[in-house]
Amino acid sequence: GWSLIMAASSSSTVNTDQSEIGAYRTENVLVQVTTIRLTKENYLRWSAAITMRIAGRGRIAYVNGRKVEPAVDSMAWDTWFLEDNQVKSWIVNSVSSDIQPLIFRKKTARDMWIILEQD
């Protein structure tokens, strides 16, 4: 629930002693970003909740299309791929099991978002 999310997010505040791997591990523990699961009836409510959570983690550009995939051979690609997959996992885990197959194989978080906006 929210208490787990709040406890985990408060423990991920900036700490100069914390390694990068530790920061990523903290991110990965937080699979459930919202208690609201998208069903066929609650898109507006779900969208508002997940947008706040994604924006609050500094990743909204991955769903609104402003963060485009860099060239695969560029230095920026690894970070982009990691962060995009974090957002994809947050989205997949915030939708109901009957909606997951519609988005599961999409290449990017933006691609998933477009499908969910349409349906």
Image (spheres, rainbow, N blue to C red):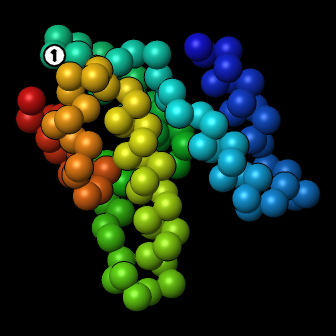
**Figure label count:** 1
Question: Mark 1 packing: few (<14 Cα in 10 Å), some, or many (20+)?
Answer: few
Farthest residue, direction bottom: 73
Could you say which quadrant of the image residue 51 lies in? Answer: top left
Q: Is residue 63 left or right of residue 31?
A: left
Percent across and percent down for residue 89 are 42, 42
Q: Residue at x 74, y 24 (%)?
A: 7
Q: Does 98 sit above or below residue 85?
A: above
Q: Residue at x 76, y 52 (%)?
A: 22
Q: Is residue 29 left or right of residue 43?
A: right
In depth, the one of 14 and 34 nearer the eye is: 34
Farthest residue, direction right: 17
Percent across and percent down for residue 66 are 31, 60
What type is the residue that disc 1 sits on? Answer: Lys
Q: Is residue 86 left or right of residue 2?
A: left
Circle 1 residue:
40
* Numbered disc 1: secondary structure: loop
Q: Residue at x 38, y 27 (%)?
A: 94
Q: Is residue 48 visible?
A: no
Q: Residue at x 73, y 59 (%)?
A: 21
Q: Is residue 59 left or right of residue 62?
A: right
Q: Does 24 sit above or below residue 45?
A: below
Percent across and percent down for residue 41 are 17, 11
Could you say which quadrant of the image residue 37 lies in? Answer: top left
Q: Does 115 sit above or below residue 37?
A: below
- Quadrant where the C terminus sits is top left
Q: Does 32 sit above or below residue 70?
A: above
- Quadrant where the N terminus sits is top right
Q: Is residue 58 visible?
A: yes
Percent across and percent down for residue 114 are 17, 44
